[in-house]
């Protein structure tokens, strides 16, 4: 999820960066406006809470002095209702802000190519010659599904496209690769 502070403090930069990912400036403006509303609600709520606390102290003093504080108590019940309503509105606005922020893509690096899909990507570097086979090699996703170690369909239902669930031997292989990487880095760190 993107940080609203970054968007708030660098609105035009955020719009320009997200435009390269297909996000319209209006969406960024909307989240900024909702954030401003959220911040204003926080200020208003805190002011009312401070007013309530001050009045509560005055009510306590009046009761100790055996004075009638009915009018102040009724006024504070009204303030309490306003605070509750503002808190509910604040929660709804925060939910809207989070909903938008969670769906915005990450800001692309300055060196990232701009384009609507991966066909605009460029090869950064290459080493060695690709291996030549005497048969038509299959893609890993085809092999993984055929072997029952990858499940793209179920992952897409749960978390969207471009995700995969590892199953059985696939999960064990994935864990083995992680452990290998961790062991390699731990071993290198011990040598230093």
Image (cartoon, helix red, strand yellow):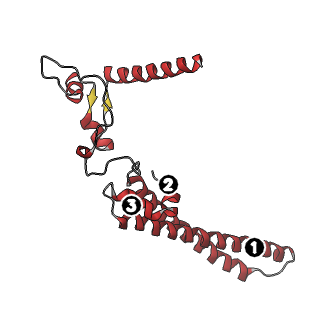
Badge 2 vs badge 3, beta-carbon distance below 8 Å: no
Q: Is residue 163 left or right of residue 190?
A: left
- According to the picture, the residue beneath numbered tag 2 turns out to be 3
Q: Residue at x 32, y 48 (%)?
A: 113
* Tag 1 near tag 3, CB within 8 Å: no
Residue drawn at x 76%, y 80% as measured from the top left: 69
Q: How many marks?
A: 3
Mark 2 touching mark 1, by CB under 8 A? no
* Cα distance between the residues tagged 2 and 1: 35 Å
Q: Earlier in the sequence, mark 1 or mark 3?
A: 3
Q: Quadrant of residue 50?
A: bottom right
What residue would you read off at disc 3?
Answer: 16
* Crowd class of label 2 (few under 14; some 14 to 19; many from 20; radius 10 Å): few
Residue beneath the point at 67% across and 70% down: 49
Which residue in the structure is indicated by mark 1?
A: 54
Q: Residue furthest left?
A: 135
User: Toward the viewer: 189 or 54?
Assistant: 189
């Amino acid at each position: 999820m993107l940080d609203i502070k970054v968007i708030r403090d660098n609105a035009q930069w955020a719009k320009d960066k997200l435009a390269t990912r297909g996000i319209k400036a209006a969406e960024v403006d909307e989240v900024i406006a909702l954030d401003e509303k959220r911040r204003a609600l926080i200020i208003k709520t805190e002011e009312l809470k401070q007013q309530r606390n001050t009045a509560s102290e005055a009510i306590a003093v009046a009761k100790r002095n055996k004075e009638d504080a009915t009018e102040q108590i009724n006024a504070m019940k009204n303030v309490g209702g306003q605070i509750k309503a503002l808190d509910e509105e604040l929660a709804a606005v925060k939910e809207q802000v989070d909903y938008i922020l969670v769906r915005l893509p990450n800001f692309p690096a300055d060196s990232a190519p701009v384009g609507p899909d991966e066909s605009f990507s460029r090869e950064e570097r290459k080493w060695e010659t690709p291996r030549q086979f005497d048969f038509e090699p299959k893609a890993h996703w085809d092999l993984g599904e055929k072997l029952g170690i990858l499940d793209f369909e179920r992952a897409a239902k749960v978390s969207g496209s471009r995700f995969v669930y590892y199953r059985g031997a696939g999960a064990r292989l994935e864990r083995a690769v992680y452990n290998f990487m961790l062991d390699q880095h731990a071993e290198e760190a011990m040598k230093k």
